[in-house]
Amino acid sequence: MVEGHGVHRVAASARRHLVGKRFTATSPNGRFAHGAEVIDGKELKRVDAIGKNLFYFFNEADGPDAHVMHVHFGMSGRFSTHHTLPGPEPGATTRLRLESREHGICALLSAMTVELGDISLFQTKRAKLGEDPLREDADADRLWEKFTRSRKSVGLALMDQAMFAGVGNIYRAEILYKAGVHPEQPCADLPRPAFDEVWRHSVELLQRGFVTGSILTVDPDEAKTLGEPWTRRYVYNQRSCGRCGSAVKTWDMAARTVYCCEVCQPLVKSETSNGASAAVRIKVARDHVPFVSHCAAESPGTLAAEPEKLTVAKLKEILDSAAAWPEGLKRTAKKAELVAAVRDMATGGYTPATLARHGLAATPSPRKIPAPGIAALEGAEASASAAAAEKRRAGEKGNVEHVALADDESLGRGASKGNKRGGTRGAPVTPETRAPDRSKVRRRESP
């Protein structure tokens, strides 16, 4: 699923390259033919992102004459911008193609949902969406009020787009871990300081994702201390907790896998607990068996430290290349035997960090909660090609598509002129990000 930080990256790119231009609009696969006909020749006035939803305003930025296109990428959508014409050939899933010969630019859109309406379409969708940590109008107090009245668990609340807009499963696992909150903790029982921690980490991590184009949740200094495999994520798809060494537990929550270190994220008992159902879910929690994640890339070091995440073919390749095939181990050996052989071959071994090394279970807090939004960060984000290069270095396969933003270079079509027109840097991506400078915030039109 394309998560909130990725959707905001698409919106920021569109504001930089497309807003203020008129386009010839067509629907290559015919699934947006009427909508393309309506917006053909109309000026793109505004682009807005709320959670995992995009809104393109043609003809007017607001008001009765606005044509509003709503986009939800789903699992594999993409928006690519090209500064050379005619650009790439549309694919079978391309619903919309925009072209401006005057400006020498075209764009291709594929998505699960592409629909056109008037301003009421935007207003209706907006009313159903909750607080987005990447919007300046996000209101933590309003969200807190929802928490105090909710019977849901915090884990469910973070995935409820009517409460938290833009947070997905990877961010849920990492936000709650950093806040030291158990996923089954009832919202109504969460103290305000604990809620503030959840909100703080939501803002910080999604802002970091917006800047880097990658889901990087481990703080840079701690990544150096913990080492592999905890340089990118703390508990998502991890066998054990890097801070205390305890097994990471997983169970199902509304058909999605939830991750938790129950030492660093203790469940606080209360009178309004979710009761028997939560107890049953926790009781059947299992030790997590790591897998190769296509949603969040693994670094080569992580894969070396956790060979369980490798395929049988890759394990055999490692043993062969190192001339370390154990005597007596058959070529038809089971994966567990191959994993053990790779572990025996490796030097250094797997040594979990202890809780004492870090001191506290939850990530220490700064003195104040960071302001939500990305306006002060726009123009500092990594380009699509730089973000794609970072994922390749981390081991993500090129045919896995959970990233919506693309350009010529990230698609292997040569350097994108968009990177030279200011705004998006192509420097190597790191998890470091600066706090927004509120003195330089560029105000966007409010909905």
Image: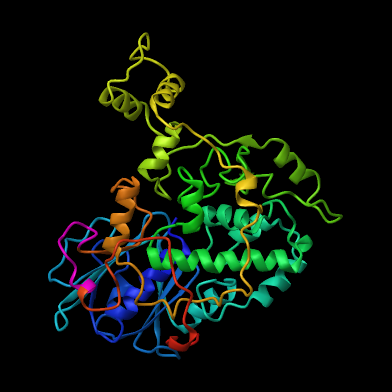
Front residue of 247 and 257? 247
Magenta span includes 411? yes
> Is residue 109 visible from the viewing direction of this image?
no
Residue 370 appears left or right of 428:
right
Residue 356 appears left or right of 234:
right
Estimate the x, y position of residue 145 in percent, counting from the top left. 73, 73
The image quadrant where one finds the N terminus is bottom left
Estimate the x, y position of residue 2 in percent, counting from the top left. 43, 59
Q: How many marks?
A: 0
Span colored in magenta: 409-419
Seen in the picture, residue 312 relative to 383 is either above or below; the reply is above
Residue at the top extreme of this rendering: 328
* Residue sitting at x 34%, y 77%: 379
* Residue sitting at x 56%, y 54%: 174
Front residue of 287 and 304? 304
Estimate the x, y position of residue 179 in percent, counting from the top left. 64, 59
Name the magenta segment's main secondary structure. loop
Residue 151 appears left or right of 422:
right
Seen in the picture, residue 427 relative to 135 is either above or below; the reply is above
The quarter holding residue 37 reads bottom left
Seen in the picture, residue 166 relative to 329 is either above or below; the reply is below
Magenta span includes 68? no
> Is residue 360 visible from the viewing direction of this image?
yes
Front residue of 406 and 325? 325
* Residue sitting at x 12%, y 69%: 86
Colour theme: rainbow
* Residue sitting at x 40%, y 86%: 66
Residue 143 appears left or right of 421:
right
Estimate the x, y position of residue 374 in percent, counting from the top left. 45, 76
